[in-house]
Amino acid sequence: MLTEQAALERVLAGVTPLPPIAQPLTSSLLGCFAGRAVHASVPLPGFDNSSMDGYAVHAADTRSDTPLTVVGEQPAGPSLNLTLPFGAAIRIFTGAPVPAGADAVIMQEDVDLKTSPSGPRIVCREPVELDENIRGAGSDLCMGQKLLEAGTALTPMVLGVLASQGLREIWVHPPAKVAVVTTGDELVPPGLPLQPGQLYNSNGLMLESLVRQVSSTEVHSQHLPDNLAATTTALDKLIANHDFLILSGGVSVGDHDCIKPALQALGHPAEFWRVKVKPGKPLLYVQAKRPDGGLCHIFGLPGNPVSSFVTFLLFVRPALLKAMGAAGKHLSLPIVSATLSTPLSNGGDRPHYVRGFYENGVFTPLGIQQSHALFGLSRANALLRMEADEVLNEGDSIGQVLLVS
């Protein structure tokens, strides 16, 4: 049985990023990862412009109380190609290009506006310094500056700076093609009546949603009965058309568990199928070669919902992200330190991921800590990783709290 670290290393060693493709620069790229580095082709700002509504001036002219004649106006928008003579001012607005000759902008709040037969004049109540209230061309971003590395997550802020360059498209790693398959004759779709011994299929929707949190890809969903022939046929088709196949249930050694024998019949032996972690020990991982030469990464997750949830986050999520071009810190869930609100002990020989709620630096376990307990999981926003045989007391400082929502 592999440790969780050894299992994750084996999974990630077999995953390579999907080849990048050029895509239109739209909000649909949110959550994708850059396939190539991008350098600035447009400086920011592209021209000297005013950061205030006020008057473009020569800074030296503001050091006396001599009125300055307002000789023009420059609104935000196309430059009017104005030139500022000494002893004068030009009305200007936020974002407007600074007239030639001006070396500062004085805020409108710092002047007294007066009228005269020759036109409006201002008297400066406060002097301004050279370049005050002027955003210099290229002061934020200069030509050729690297905007992002390959593998950078495309956040709203990153998309904004890319749009500032006038790019119509960028290279990104595409979302993986993912199928989520649930198994078991005991599972019934929501909305149908339950017969004795049946359960509603909750894992399917939960796993689809977990995939959608990672990637904007459409997820193919399917349910398979406990039938070896039907399972073998379905898996063969799914493997041929997907990068990732996420299976829930049917991966253990019971008489009605069909996943392992179906994959063996198709010539896809398991890389491993047990991991030293609680909940989630019966985890199956297979690398299946597709007819097109690519790989389909198959994860057989345990059927209990908490086990499916935990093993998805620990093993499937980082593999999906790596396929999408992510690297380094992007592969991991955020980890924080906390204070424990109540005593906890892990008497088993496996690390245990305790479901709980993290708020204001305090972690509080929620519900019964068993692999079927879906309600407690539904209220959790964090997982506490406890080592085997670890005992913790109320008020202890804990450093392995994974944020999951």
Image: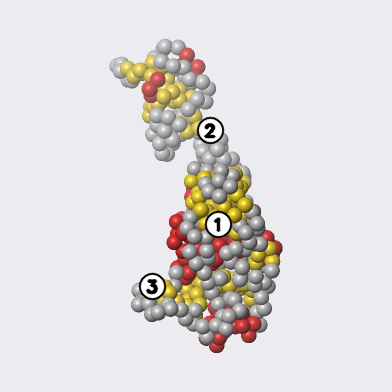
Pointer 2: residues within 10 angstroms few (<14), some, or many (20+)? Answer: some
Answer whether residue 208 is visible to the viewer in this image.
no
Q: Position of residue 190 (x, y in %)?
A: 38, 73
**319 and 326: which one is in front?**
319
Q: Position of residue 226 (x, y in %)?
A: 51, 83
The correct choice, above or below, for 109 with respect to 370 in the image is above
Query: Relative to residue 118, is residue 60 drawn left or right?
Result: right
Say which quarter of the image contains residue 319.
bottom right
Q: Position of residue 169 (x, y in %)?
A: 52, 57
Q: Which residue is mark 1?
A: 354
Q: How many marks?
A: 3
Q: Which residue is mark 2?
A: 136
Pointer 1: residues within 10 angstroms few (<14), some, or many (20+)? Answer: many
Pointer 3: residues within 10 angstroms few (<14), some, or many (20+)? Answer: few
The correct choice, above or below, for 138 with respect to 63 in the image is below
Callout 1, which amino acid?
Val
Instruction: Name the mark nearer the viewer: 3 or 2.
Output: 3
